[in-house]
Image (spheres, helix red, strand yellow):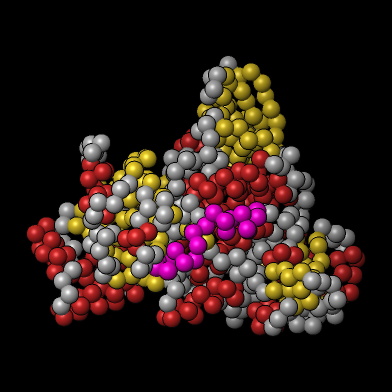
Amino acid sequence: MSVKLEHVPVAIVGAGPIGLTASCLLSQAGIKHILLEQSPGLHQWPQAHVVSARTMEILRAAGISEPALRAKAAPLADMSYLSCWVHTLAKEPWGGFALLSPENADYLVQVLQTTPTPNANIPQDKLEQILYQHAQAAPVVDIRFGHQLKSHVQSAKGVIASVCNREDDTLYEINADFLIACDGAGSAVRHQCGIEMRGPRSLQHWVTVVLQADFRHLVKAHPGLLYWTYGAERTGLFIAYDIDDRWVYMHACEEGQEITDEQPKQWVRSAIGDDTPFKIVHTDRWSMSAQVAQHFRDGRIFLAGDAAHRFPPTGGMGMNTGMQDVFNLCWKIARVVNGTSAVALLDSYEHERRPSVERNCEQSRVNFQKMSQVEEAIGISSNVEKTRENLNLLDIDDTHSQQRRERIQQSIDAQRDHFFMLGMDLGVCYDGALIQTCPEEAPQNNYRASEYNPSSAAGNRLPHCWLQEGDKQLSTHDIVASVKLTLLTTSDGYQQWAQALTDTGTDNIEMQIIGSAHLAPADDGWDTLIGIKQYGALLIRPDRHIAFSTDKFSEDAWVELSQLLKNYQVG
């Protein structure tokens, strides 16, 4: 029996990285909310670990300390290789994808030029700890661990959720204006809404073995993140969360395969290839999927993260895509809750997010399938004896084996879109009712996975460049408001744009003037990447996407902007 009914503007279900980030964003907007998590606490084991540049930008926008994040990240020296392919961990790699190499220098330079926050390798459990510390400090949030959403009933005005306090099995009800489901791949909220997943449910099955181990002496010549190991009857993957202490070994298996307590120890020992000690601290099973929800919304309920989409981990886009979900959604919910915008604003969520979600899902699936090219070059086949022979020959130092290793390296080099995904990460471009309709010749990103082309055309992410405010250096992203729209213009165009906003009573827009004594370009990035002309302007949304772009002030430009602004306002 329910014991009480609470009202709150927003309820979030799931305190993983996506739910915690949503909480931080809502708190920043001053929106009261409750965060429900059925588990008694945060995740204890590492899962996702690739924190993309865009996610780092989102966390920066949410007020998360970048030094705190970097302190938990793997040092750059331990990421010399993004991936290595080996017989066993104790043997020299047959080939690898090197991050710190002359061949990839141009890509690294582009990363540093196009974002204020390059990507990091942070275990999910450590990331969650940082997010939780920030989230729980806000006065507008109530975080409840051990509280499980059992069911919900929805009306035109909100969602009544029945919640069980698992500590004492008492039930209570929450009346939320909106509910954000961040409750993972098996989302109870999604199931209750009757929303189906589309796409292959199971591409491959894996056993995950979390290890406490120091493998530094084995990989010191090629420190990296991933080590693919191959045997005649086994395929495995080591993930180096911390080379000196914390690893995960993933072993491919069959669905429903019986696994004894001793087998994981045998797999790991065989994949290491020597007697280096290790301790197994946790094991788990999971299935690789490539699925996207049929709908991301059911009335006042919104799906985000794994509740809305499940990707193969090849490319590390799963968690990062979920971060972009809530960055797109939370400022819109905040505007509706505070009365700035009509509920219709939320219609844009699925329209804007679905194309990039489906694109990321497909690219992750393609990355997974292309890995077979490396296995083919290595000599992996269904014939166990032939595979064993091929693997043993590769370890012999002769001309024939050297030629085969060169072919393996060529197949690894062809995986560039798997490991370099700046285009997928930063090249998201929105369209629809909240975005100015651009002429066909306007530059738009083409979504090539490893190539990002900054553009100030409407719909694109605001290009990053450095600005100077007194003795402080800021990114263009740092001057964008968290709930209001922001109009970027020049000192020459300020008076005209400001007067137009005043004359029409549009006062819910912040203005930032570039080129004034207060805020000036720190280098030539402003001209080359954004290039607002003398009387031009950009209208920037809280998620740092460009809603409107013009290179001049004119009556036609103002009329076009005024019409667009109606879609952001009440009535």
Report if residue 68 lies within the magenta region.
yes
Q: Which residue is located at x 39 percent, y 72 percent?
A: 98
User: Relative to residue 415, is residue 19 depicted above or below?
Assistant: above
**Residue 235 image point, x, y percent:** 24, 55
**Residue 63 image point, x, y percent:** 68, 54
User: Is 325 left or right of 546, judged from the image as shown?
Assistant: left
Res. 114 visible in picture: yes
Foreground of the two, 459 or 209 = 209
**Residue 537 image point, x, y percent:** 76, 74
The image quarter containing residue 549 is bottom right
Foreground of the two, 313 or 556 = 313
Report if residue 16 lies within the magenta region.
no
User: Is 135 left or right of 257, judged from the image as shown?
Assistant: right
User: Relative to residue 402, is residue 336 depicted above or below?
Assistant: above
The residue segment tinted magenta is 64-82
**Residue 496 image point, x, y percent:** 87, 75
Foreground of the two, 8 or 214 = 214
Q: Which residue is located at x 19 percent, y 57 percent?
A: 231
